[in-house]
Image: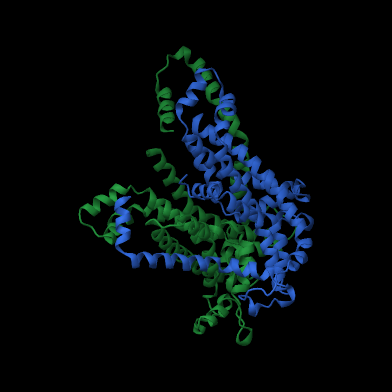
Amino acid sequence: MSQTVVAGRREERRPAPPPRRRRKWSRRLRSWGPGLLLVAPSLVALAIFVYGFAGWNVRMSVSSWRGLRQPNDFIGLRNYRELFVDETFRNDVRNLVVFTLVFILGSLAIGAFLALLLDKGVRGESVFRSIYLLPMAISFIATGIIWRWLLDSSTGSSTAGINKLFVYIGLDWLRSDWHKTPNMWAIAFIALPAAWSLSGYVMALFLAGLRGIPEELREAARVDGATESKVYWHVVRPLMLPVLMSAVVILTHISLKTFDLLYAIAPLDARTETPALYMWYTSFRGGFFARGAAIATLLFVAVALVIVPYIWYSVRSERRR
Amino acid sequence: MTTRTARRARGPYLRAARYLVLFLFGCLFLLPVYALLVTSLKDPASVSVVTMWELPGKLSMDSFRAVWPKLQNGFVNSLILAIPASIISSILGAANGFVLAKWRFPGADFVFPVILFGMFIPYQAILIPMFRVIASMGLNRDLSGLILVHIIYGLPITTLIFRSYFASISEELIEAAKVDGAGMLRTFFFVALPIAPPAFAVAMIWQFTSAWNDFLFGIVLTRTEYWPITVALNNIAGAQTVPFNEAMASALLACVPTVLVYVLLGRFFMRGLMAGALKG
């Protein structure tokens, strides 16, 4: 891989006598032209569907489009200004922040913990791993449908779901109203099914990272008299920072755009609504397409702020390798 | 390895505790699956939310029989859409990955991250324009629009998977083909593709799973008779009045293909996951 880069650059730098330049250029075109041609359809499709549409969406967000007829007017940032004072939107952003924090911290804690336990070498490791990762194969819709029955908030003799389990094991006081809790923490409970889905993924990421640390490094520290916990803190922990970063970035972007899980568990409930859902309701149910486009643009910017540095960093560190 | 074994033997209690914790977490992860299985296998008459954790008295397939007619159409739709979407997306991804890894053109270093971003874009940000375009082209009258969209938004990840895969094959193989006078297409078809089946497995499994599990595109781009399984499932089981056993039975049926793929081909599924974290 890196060899190709070097070879390619060297060829470009080679000084060519002026009369032959044209022939050389055409020869080079003949060498990479077919490759470019082969990628061209995909590039065009992505240019239109990703960048073209995202740009068009921004354009819509500064129009006054609502209902079926789409005017081509320009009203500046009015849609955004209205959003920032819109009680629903502010509520949804608050929900999203709570959800993202609880979901990410929860998944990271569980995933990292399981990875540390598995790292030491456990019999039946692949069985454990497969169980923790199984929820990844199940759609968010199915996950949501299962969990809305588990997060049952009935009381007394009709107690069911997880609350019922608490009764069985004598921990009745843990009973919860889950996502029907009447305060701003309601959405934090949706992090439960979300973490169920994704902490296995975090575990797999961390485990791969731990396995990537050469055993000699740990052994060297042990020879120097470090205890096992010191080895983890001083040798393993710093080397795991890139993995932690990947996990945080991936979980953040999933959390920002999560739609189906919330929609399947509690549709049209202000306590568990996020901008991703508001965008959908207001555009496709209400016909306020310009406002929906404005919310979508804000989501796009939020995701780009996290993802662009991450891609840049990944590609750069790959080139260095 | 020997030092590790020695260290392990030193703390038998610690080791037992570790297994216990891993086992308990396994149980926690399987709890929802248990409820799902047990409830959908119970006799519908004896199903109650209050007794959801109790084992069935006698096994019955009646819940499945009740929901399958309502789910069948969506199931078939999802197959019709996920299979071609995963095959076509993987073939295009293979071509892109090969060119970006082994037949680079000026600017390839710029193009790759630009493609990658498509993998992370929140679909909300393109949803309204996409809905307009697909509708104005008349592609929302059947599954073709949905298939097209899944192919295109699958390209970044399939390109990434194949690029990593081809980057790991030796330069000599490509050079040898070049020396023999093979052009780009010939090298791609006769040198690169024959050794790419593992990458195809990873890419196709990933694509199949995400097309099968997608909800947002499905709900925006199709009408009732072309609903994919997730939309059909949400309509049956998401209603407030649906019986518990029918909700669980339909959720279980909707998971069968992806879980089957996961159980049979988990290794490739894992690799796709890792590639998605840009670590491939």
In x, y percent, where is residue B167?
47, 35
| Residue at the image position 76 percent from the left and 54 percent from the top | B226
| Residue at the image position 75 percent from the left and 60 percent from the top | B71
In x, y percent, where is residue A279?
63, 62
* B51 relative to A24, above or below: below
| Along the viewing direction, whichever of B258 and A182 lies nearer the viewer | B258
Chain ID for green: A
**Residue farthest top in this picture:** A19
| Residue at the image position 61 percent from the left and 70 percent from the top | B35
- Can residue A101 be seen in this snapshot? no
Res. A168 image quadrant: bottom right
In x, y percent, where is residue A7?
42, 26
- Its colouring scheme is by chain
Query: How many numbered discs, if any?
Result: 0
In x, y percent, where is residue A74?
64, 54
B99 left or right of B131?
A: left
| Along the viewing direction, whichever of B176 and B106 lies nearer the viewer | B176
- Can residue A103 be seen in this snapshot? yes
B181 left or right of B56?
A: left
| Along the viewing direction, whichever of A152 and A32 lies nearer the viewer | A152
**Residue farthest left in this picture:** A224
Colour in which chain B is drawn: blue
| Along the viewing direction, whichever of A80 and B243 lies nearer the viewer | B243
